[in-house]
Image: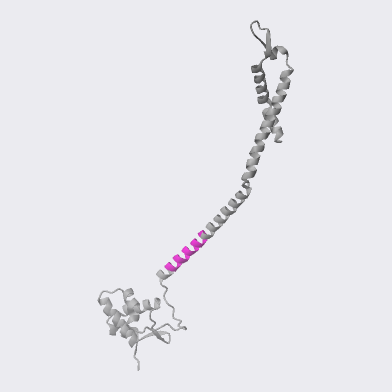
Amino acid sequence: MEKHFKISDFAEKIGKHPNTVDGWFKKMEQKRIHCVSRVDNEKVYDELDLAIGLHIDAKRSDGWSLQAIFNELDEHFDLRPFPEDMRDPVAIDLEVVRRKFTEDMQASVAAVVREQVEAAVGEVRQQYAELMNQLPKPRDPAEERQERITDIITRRRVEATLRNEALQLWSTKPEKERIRRTGLFGIKKEEDHAARDLFVMNYIDEHFETRLKKEFNL
């Protein structure tokens, strides 16, 4: 018949204070490593528990930490699993709770940051697309060349028209403004080309901008 022990007798067989032994097995239950059997909702220890307790005591005497001992228990014993209907409260492992809380907080913050970054990136992309739509479309090189040619031809035509107008006005000026005397006694008369060219140039400069804007409907 399998033997069962209460904590006082059980601790005495291990040679430790009941509080010490009870603490070992409580920690194992907190970490879900090994379950102590219950009878009428009271813990009872058996020979498997005794072997585990003696093993822990020996390892502690050799300077092992409890966690290190717990990590290798399943290599030496068939540890007792926890029944699904076990209702004894298990003490909360504050370190596990703290770590879980920290991980959840980090995940939540990371999710918020990720959403904000994605929203900012989406807004920038939308603004970029709107800006690109507002920019003038690339022009065809052939169209640009034709436009430059048309511009040059228009400028030349405006200059030619203004030159003809200036020459007509020049021809209506009094003879003393248009003609200069040359020769030995100033008997020979000829047109003052320098004065004429200066008059034409000034006329073109004065009217060129207005006439060009009119040609381009500006």
Question: Quadrant where the N terminus lies?
Answer: bottom left
Q: Quadrant of residue 54?
A: bottom left
Instruction: Report if residue 105 lies within the magenta region.
Output: yes
Picture coordinates of residue 201, whole percent (x, y): 65, 23
Examine the rendered structure and indicate whether residue 126 appears above or below residue 195.
below
Q: Quadrant of residue 202?
A: top right
Q: Picture coordinates of residue 90 (x, y %)? A: 42, 77
The image shows residue 150, relative to residue 10, as above or below, that is above
Q: Is residue 179 above or below residue 3?
A: above
Residue situated furthest bottom in the rendering: 1
Query: 68 or 52, which lies in front?
Result: 68
Residue 89 appears in which quarter of the rendering? bottom left
Q: Position of residue 204 (x, y in %)?
A: 67, 25
| Quadrant location, the C terminus | top right
The structure residue drawn at horizontal position 65% and vertical position 40%, both measured from the top left corner, is 147
Q: Residue furthest right?
A: 172
Provide the residue span drawn in magenta: 98-113
Q: Residue at x 40, y 69 (%)?
A: 95
- Count the labels in the image: 0
Residue 113 picture location, percent across and down = 51, 59
Determine the residue located farthest toward the left in the rendered image: 62
Q: Magenta segment, principal secondary structure?
A: helix
Residue 31 colored in magenta in the image: no
Q: How is the image coloured?
A: one colour
Q: On screen, 130 above or below 96?
A: above
The residue shown at (68%, 23%) is: 203
